[in-house]
């Protein structure tokens, strides 16, 4: 399956909210108000992943922020279950990391639930390190892991 990435348009909102409800349990999924708040935040950007055929069906998205403090933040990555394990999450994350680097970010951080084994494996695969834990971060009482990744190019030592 081939995918294309494009920027968010306001008419995407209902589809993104539906996808978020499917991807996360109650207490972790966003309310419409929260999702709208994150998408509209200053320095935020939202990437939409579509199936690369005539249907242009939206099958995933990412909301992130490229902060003025040189630190990027991924708010959420959501891939519909039928589109998972095909490289789409990676395409979204790598596109977001490139955009953050271009905006001058040296570092990217994010949070994920301690019981989200798929997400933890996914971020480890993308070289994120666990740096902290936020107890009872989610409204269902689950703790969050805080992960970060250095976005600066690695300079080979001699
Ligand atoms: C986490 C998520 C975004 C991954 O998206 P994806 O499109 O399936 O990811 P990819 O296909 O790019 O996976 C890349 C690598 O991540 C790891 N990975 C992804 N899903 C995994 C899983 N369920 N179990 C173990 N490892 C996994 C693997 O190393 C995989 O590489 P491989 O396919 O060569 O084994 C997706 O599962 C999802 O949307 N989950 C629900 C929402 C969520 O938890 N979002 C993240 C928290 S904000």
Image: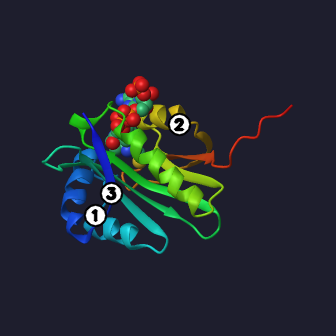
Q: Is residue 74 left or right of residue 27?
A: right
Residue shown at 51% from the left, 57% from the top: 99
Q: Which residue is mark 3?
A: 6
The residue indicated by pointer 2 is: 126
Q: Residue 5 placed where, x, y %?
A: 33, 51
Name the quarter where the C terminus is drawn.
top right
Name the element at disc 2. loop
Badge 1: few (under 14), some or many (20 or more) residues near its Cα, within 10 Å?
some
Residue at x 31% of width, y 59% of height: 30
Mark in front: 2 vs 3: 3
* Residue 20 position in % (x across, y down): 27, 53
**Secondary structure state at the residue bearing disc 3:** strand
Work out whether 26 lies above or below 86: below
Q: Nearer the viewer, residue 135 or 58?
A: 58
Quadrant in which residue 75 is drawn: bottom left
Which label is found at residue 31?
1
Where is residue 136? Give x, y as percent.
Answer: 47, 51
| Callout 2–callout 3 Cβ contact below 8 Å | no
Query: At which x and y percent is residue 50?
Result: 25, 49
Residue 157: which quarter of the image?
top right
Q: CA distance from mark 3 to mark 1?
A: 24 Å
């Amino acid at each position: 399956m081939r995918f294309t990435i494009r920027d968010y348009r306001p008419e995407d909102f209902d589809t993104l909210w539906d996808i978020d409800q499917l991807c996360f349990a109650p207490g972790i999924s966003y309310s419409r108000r929260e999702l709208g708040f994150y998408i509209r935040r200053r320095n935020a950007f939202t990437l939409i992943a579509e199936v690369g055929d005539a249907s242009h069906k939206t099958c995933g998205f990412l909301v992130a922020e490229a902060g003025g403090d040189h630190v990027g933040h991924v708010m959420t990555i959501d891939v519909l279950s039928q589109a998972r394990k095909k490289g789409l999450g990676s395409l979204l994350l790598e596109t977001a990391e490139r955009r953050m680097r271009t905006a001058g970010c040296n570092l990217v951080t994010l949070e994920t639930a301690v019981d989200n084994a798929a997400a933890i494996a996914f971020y480890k695969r993308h070289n994120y390190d666990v740096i902290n834990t936020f107890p009872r971060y989610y409204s269902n009482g689950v703790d969050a892991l805080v992960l970060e990744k250095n976005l600066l190019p690695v300079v080979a030592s001699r």
